[in-house]
Image (tube, rainbow, N blue to C red):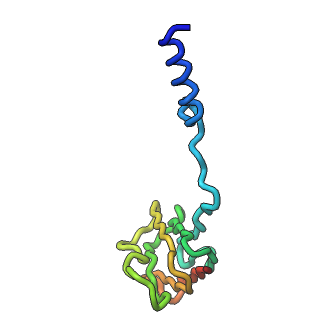
């Protein structure tokens, strides 16, 4: 076998071992849970309470049937919570909006819609 042939075989073997063949699936990180999804609908968050582990995420999705604007605003959270402002949306939306946030600090988080604060309330509980 020629030197070129041995190099080609060696390169193909190395590539296969590294997983760089076309169509090879990307590795999946074990233990990375999907975000808990909360619907932001006219006058309610659904569900109104979610529990996640430290580092987990919540994804708020505005319902396509909404006719009223809504936001997500952190009313209260753990005392040692940093960057509180990042836990609230910056604007309001009626439909076609999403807001995702990770929760690295264990504790209880209470959210409201500032436009409908007496009707739209929810809790995120983050466990260690």
The residue sitting at 59% across, 39% down in the picture is 25
The one of 22 and 65 positioned closer to us in this rendering: 22
Q: Quadrant of the C terminus?
A: bottom right
- Whether 103 is drawn above or below 112: the answer is above
The one of 92 and 12 positioned closer to us in this rendering: 12
Q: How many marks?
A: 0
Picture coordinates of residue 91 (x, y %)?
Answer: 36, 72
The residue sitting at 58% across, 26% down in the picture is 13
- Whether 119 is drawn above or below 46: the answer is below
Q: Quadrant of the N terminus?
A: top right
The image quadrant that residue 38 belongs to is bottom right
Picture coordinates of residue 125 (x, y %)?
Answer: 60, 82
- Whether 116 is drawn above or below 58: the answer is below
The one of 46 and 53 positioned closer to us in this rendering: 53
The residue sitting at 56% across, 19% down in the picture is 9
The one of 101 and 29 positioned closer to us in this rendering: 29
The residue sitting at 51% across, 89% down in the picture is 118
Picture coordinates of residue 81 (x, y %)?
Answer: 44, 85
Farthest residue, direction bottom? 79
């Amino acid at each position: 076998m020629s030197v070129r042939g041995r190099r080609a075989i060696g390169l193909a073997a190395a590539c296969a071992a590294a997983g760089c063949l076309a169509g090879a699936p990307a590795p999946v990180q074990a233990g990375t849970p999907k975000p808990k999804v909360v619907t932001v609908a006219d006058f309610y968050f659904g569900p109104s309470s979610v529990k996640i582990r430290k580092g987990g995420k919540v994804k708020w999705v505005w319902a396509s049937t909404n006719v009223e604007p809504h936001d997500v605003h952190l009313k209260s959270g753990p005392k040692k919570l940093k960057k509180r402002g990042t836990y609230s949306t910056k604007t309001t939306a009626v439909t076609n909006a999403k807001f995702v946030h990770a929760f690295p600090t264990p504790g209880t988080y209470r959210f409201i819609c500032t436009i409908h604060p007496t009707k739209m309330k929810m809790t995120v509980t983050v466990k260690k």
